[in-house]
Amino acid sequence: MYATTEDVFSLKTVIQSFRNWPKIFRLFWTVEKGYFITIVILNIIQGLFPVGMLYVTQELVNAVSTGVGQDWDTIAISFLLFLSFILVKQLVTLLQNYVEGLFQSLLANRLREMVLDKASTLGLADFENAEVQDQLKRAQQETSYRPYQIFVLVLSILSGGISLVSTSLFLFFWKWWVVFILILFPLISFYSYFRLSQQEFYIHWNRAERERKGWYISYLLTHDRAFKEVQIYKLGPYLIKHFRDMIAQFFYEDKKIATSRLKTSLVFECLTIAMIAFMSFIAIKAAFLKEILLGNLVSYLQGITLTHSTSQSLMHSLIGLSQHNMYVEQLFLFLDRDSSDPVKQQKVAIPAAPRQNEPFVLESIEFVNVSFTYPETERLVLQNLSFTIKKGESLAIVGENGSGKTTLVKLLTLLYKDYEGQILINGTDLKAFDLDVIRTKIGVVFQDFMQYEMSVRNNVGFGNLALLQHDDKLYHALEQSGMRSLAEGLEEGLDTQLGKWFADGLQLSGGQWQRIAIARAFLRNADLYILDEPSASLDPLAEKEVFDAFNLLTKERMGIFISHRYSSAQYADRIMVLDQGRIVEFGTHSELIRLQQKYASLYNLQASPFVVHS
């Protein structure tokens, strides 16, 4: 987005950074209208307090200095007015802090929800894209406080502007040129501070990928998934060194900016002190010559420092606004991103079912010369695939690593759309369907299936959320995957916590986790079931039980499974052999054995150790 620091510093970039304000303030309004209006009103009132404080202080000091020993009533009234003003100011501040705290919490929660909502609509290609991951990282970083800081700074400018105008008028009737200098001086320093803030933004923007790497190292060192290898291979010191080097670089960058800011601040602060000292001397001299009363002297001295600090604060608020705008732009850059998920991109009516009011059913899937290349690469992963599977059939897809098996599953489950050729559903091009409906007709267990650190109910019920509270359906799915007896034997039953991330969690073996994932797929009541490496973590007996259930389940449906075990392929009606993205053999187990080509060779290669051992 920003190729160089000059792109960040350009006036065009600064102006463009304000383009998201309509979205931001619509968001503020929709989060909680009552809080929003209250905060605006309280900030306007806060803007009037400084000049009011100058006035009541002046009246009290003048009453004391001119009425000592003579007019106690005037002094008492001025003192009560002074105390009342302080009390009201404190009450308004307390109310403001209370309402702003609640509003900030609501806003942060809403923004986190928006980021999660957007993330849930992204496609697999998005999550495999480093640029999108960087955008997501930046968006997550900015949701908690950046948009709210824009709100705070706008209100600060509003109340500060009111304070500046009122205190300036107060001083204007004494010495007009004092006001001119007090306002002009911060404007001179504006450019220097603005450049520093833009440099700071560029540094943080440019480190998003490195921060993700730091998060990943932290994840490896603090989660059980990598614990065994980290301990066995003694990776801790190596990973910590990389993490330490990374944060040392961050510290160096931050220190460099902080040093530049310190030098700039020292120059302008010295000039500021000299300027305020000169103006204060003018006021003190006037009081010494009895040209003004003591109360006026106090109010003028306060007015000088207040006008300067307010104008300085407004300058920093404007700089902060520009900086926060650019951070918030990262948030909306992510939120406004188009999804690569074909389901989210396409919404058209599906062809009518054979009979009116009859639910849509997948009868057949046909690939016609389908080829596929991963985004931002050139190598064809799948090349001119053509095959058909119909209702009541099962298909095994086998091949060596890198042959394209899992990529084919991703196309079958509609995770990618940019393929060449045609995929036909019931004889009609897939692109003519509402893909969301098609996806509901598919149940799948991926090779890298999820182990949800949640209850058994959630782990199985996520396959069909409509059945999450239907215990009989959940137990039936568990029975099909061979896990019912274990679930029924648990003290909390379906509500037993699984995994070790949370209290009282039950850790399962790899095979048990896989059978839970299979139960999740079986709960879906789909027309097509896909198992990607279902036997990877299963012993031979468990494998047979799963495939028996799979064949029974797919008898009136379609079933596809991917496997490295060629012995498993015998469970399927037909077998497809992939090699370097091409179909090299297709047929039944007996047919392919008789061919004595790749399938037979690999089948015999896997079987030979067991034959020799026997």
Image (cartoon, helix red, strand yellow):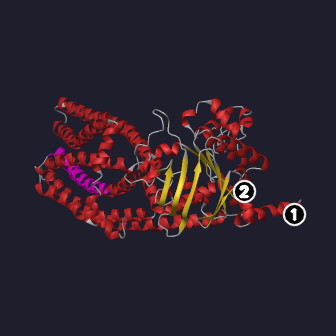
Q: Is residue 309 magenta?
A: yes
Residue type at mark 2: give it. His
Give, as a single range, the part of the protein colored magenta: 293-321
294 within the magenta span: yes
**Could you say where residue 76 lies in the image, as x and y percent from the top left?**
22, 31
Kindly identify the residue that appears in the image at 37 percent across and 36 percent down: 98
Q: Position of residue 457 (x, y in %)?
A: 62, 36
Q: Nearer the viewer, residue 130 or 607?
A: 607
Left or right? Give the position of 520 relative to 201. Answer: right
- Tell me the quarter of the picture where residue 106 sits: top left
In this rendered view, identify the residue nearer to me: 280 or 563.
563
Residue 592, visible in the rendered structure: yes
The disc labelled 1 sits on which kind of residue? Val
Q: Say if 64 sits above or below 547 in the image.
A: above
The quadrant of the image that shows the C terminus is bottom right
Taking the image as shown, residue 223 lies to the left or right of residue 143, namely: right
What is the secondary structure assignment of the residue under circle 2? helix
The disc at residue 504 is none
Residue at 32 percent across and 50 percent down: it is 150
Which residue is labeled 2 in the image?
589
Q: Is residue 454 visible?
A: no
x, y (%) of residue 444? 60, 47
* Residue under label 1: 612
Tell me which numbered mark, 2 or 1, is placed earlier along the sequence.
Answer: 2
